[in-house]
Amino acid sequence: MSIEVRPVRDGDFFAWLDVYAQYAEFYDTQLTDQKALVLWSWLTAPEHEENGYVAVDGDRIVGLAHVREFARPLEGDRGLFVDDLFVIEEERGKGVGGQLLQQARSLAEERGLGVVQWITAHDNETAQKLYDAVANRTQWVTYEIDLASAPTTAGRA
């Protein structure tokens, strides 16, 4: 297996979509055509902040990573956030995830960024073995307000 990690291309849509749909299924998330098309439009628009990379074995996409820059006010610099990282099941444990993370690291280094960060599910132990080998686990706990379904609770702490 010879893996090439490269930016997404216009002709990658259907193969990328197949892998991205597996990613959504892995996290038990509904991926609609509209969501997929919005993300694809971001990934293929040079002016958009979201960048997409695919791991390719021959002509087959076996993994993906979506990344974007973010500001780090306390550090006075910028970082790179890995929004999505996924390797198809039959290719896991073969170094593909590490190559995708190395691409993110290389991109951050090229841009002079201060850090590469990402999150994962607390029970994704397989991925965490890789992540623990290439990065430092932080002490931060993640919260989110789902504006589509959460009632306003400001001031009720």
Image (tube, grey):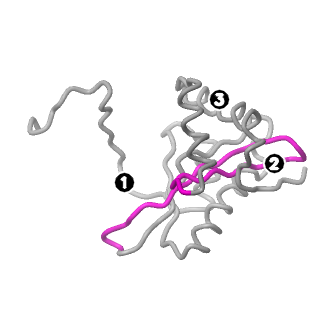
* Neighbours of disc 1 within 10 Å: few (<14), some (14-19), many (20+): few
Tell me which residue sits at (74%, 37%) in the image.
Answer: 88
Percent position of residue 37, x then y: 59, 33
Tell me which residue sits at (67%, 30%) in the image.
Answer: 22
Q: Which residues are magenta?
A: 47-75
- Above or below — where is 87 with respect to 30? below
Of helix, strand and loop, which one carries label 2? strand
* Neighbours of disc 2 within 10 Å: few (<14), some (14-19), many (20+): some
Of helix, strand and loop, which one carries label 3? helix
Label disc, if present, on residue 56 of the rendered structure: 2
Percent position of residue 83, x then y: 52, 48
* Neighbours of disc 3 within 10 Å: few (<14), some (14-19), many (20+): some
Q: Amino acid at mark 3?
A: Ala
Tell me which residue sits at (82%, 56%) in the image.
Answer: 4
Q: Looking at the picture, tell me which residue is in the foreground, 44 or 83.
A: 44
Left or right of residue 122, residue 61 in this image: right
Mark 1 vs 2, N-terminal side: 2
Label disc, if present, on residue 140 of the rendered structure: 1
Percent position of residue 49, x then y: 51, 55
Q: Amino acid at mark 2?
A: Val
Query: Residue 55: within the magenta?
Result: yes
Tell me which residue sits at (48%, 61%) in the image.
Answer: 69
Left or right of residue 5, residue 76 in this image: left
- Residue behind mark 3: 21
Q: Looking at the picture, tell me which residue is in the foreground, 84 or 53.
A: 53
Q: Amino acid at mark 1?
A: Trp
- Above or below — where is 150 with respect to 61? above
Cα–Cα gap, marks 3 and 1: 29 Å
Mark 3 vs 1, N-terminal side: 3
Cα–Cα gap, marks 1 and 2: 33 Å
Tell us which disc is closer to us: 1 or 2: 2
